[in-house]
Image: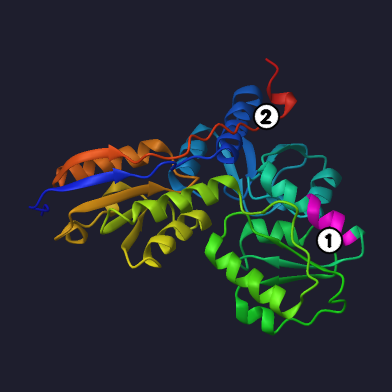
Amino acid sequence: MTAKQGFSVILANPRGFCAGVDRAIDIVERALQRFGPPIYVRHEVVHNRFVVENLRRQGAVFVDELDQVPSGSTVIFSAHGVSLAVREEAEQRGLHVFDATCPLVTKVHTEVSRLHGAGYEIVMIGHRGHPEVEGTLGQVGDRIHLVETPDDVGRLEVCCPDRLAYVTQTTLSVDDARRVIEALRARYPAVQGPRKDDICYATQNRQDAVKTLTRDTDLVIVVGSPSSSNSNRLREVAANRNIEAYMVDRATDLRPEWLAGKRAVGVTAGASAPAVLVQEVVERLRELGATEVRDMEGIAEKVVFPLPKALLTS
């Protein structure tokens, strides 16, 4: 079955890989080239099935915990970061570590440690169970609370409301985070925020691009895996603006009935989704009746994060 009517496709800009994801994948590939397989990776290095399977074929072994890594082996920490306890365990077991933590996540870790050392109680805004959140909470042993919604703020019990600060997960919805922050400030007027917004530039740019995309489209397709927080947020951004929106891992997930009666389809991709998957989706949309494909104007991202020095030498 194919869609009969013609429709246009507008590609969000920016979309797809961010500097942190590029760096994380590059670290795994360079480690494989330099040391040979197996290279162990704690958790998915980035949340995308295609990327993970491609690295697995090259010899990467993904594990949930460090006790699955043989002593003395090379292990890579994912882009989402890890707790201090994980770092200490790796050191105790003599593991050769390369840290693929996104530098913007590391910034949040540093801020949490600084605030805690200065005697602050800390509120972390984020999604329970997400690896980034677990890693950030694990930077300190106490005086840190997790909230997900404004309602959670109403249930907070803090010891020192005059010495309270907040940080956020880097891949949150900008709008959702703002609502939680407003609730925090309403209940705790003295609460301090980060010197610079914790939500990363790529997350914000992609969400802003989807908002622009929804002005001229009646359907938005987000390329990204179900485990990807920032990809899920992109779908939510479109849906919250009353635009029909779906997330697909691969082009084969597209359903022709979504396109019935549509005049313009927007396509974007989460920060962990490679360009090849976007191209697959575009080609499938052409098969289903797309008559025009064009890029939306947008921000040109030029951010590059350095690799570990040990992987730069030949």
| Image point (60%, 34%), residue name | 23
Q: Please name the residue that numbered disc 1 is placed on.
A: 140
| Image point (50%, 45%), residue name | 272
| Image point (40%, 37%), residue name | 275
Amino acid type of the residue that numbered disc 1 sits on in the rendered structure: Val
Looking at the picture, tell me which residue is in the foreground, 38 or 120: 120
Amino acid type of the residue that numbered disc 2 sits on in the rendered structure: Leu
User: Is residue 256 positioned above or below 188 on the image?
Assistant: above
Element under label 1? loop
The answer to which image quadrant residue 125 occupies is: bottom right
Looking at the picture, tell me which residue is in the foreground, 200 or 133: 200
Q: Position of residue 219 (x, y in %)?
A: 27, 58
Q: Position of residue 213 (x, y in %)?
A: 35, 51
Looking at the picture, tell me which residue is in the foreground, 37 or 224: 224
Prevailing SS of the magenta stretch: helix
Q: Is residue 59 left or right of residue 280?
A: right
Magenta residues? 110-116
Q: Quadrant of the N terminus?
A: bottom left
Q: Is residue 205 left or right of residue 198?
A: left
Q: Please name the residue that numbered disc 2 is placed on.
A: 307
Q: Residue furthest bottom?
A: 155
Q: Is residue 234 left or right of residue 311?
A: left
Q: Position of residue 152 (x, y in %)?
A: 65, 79
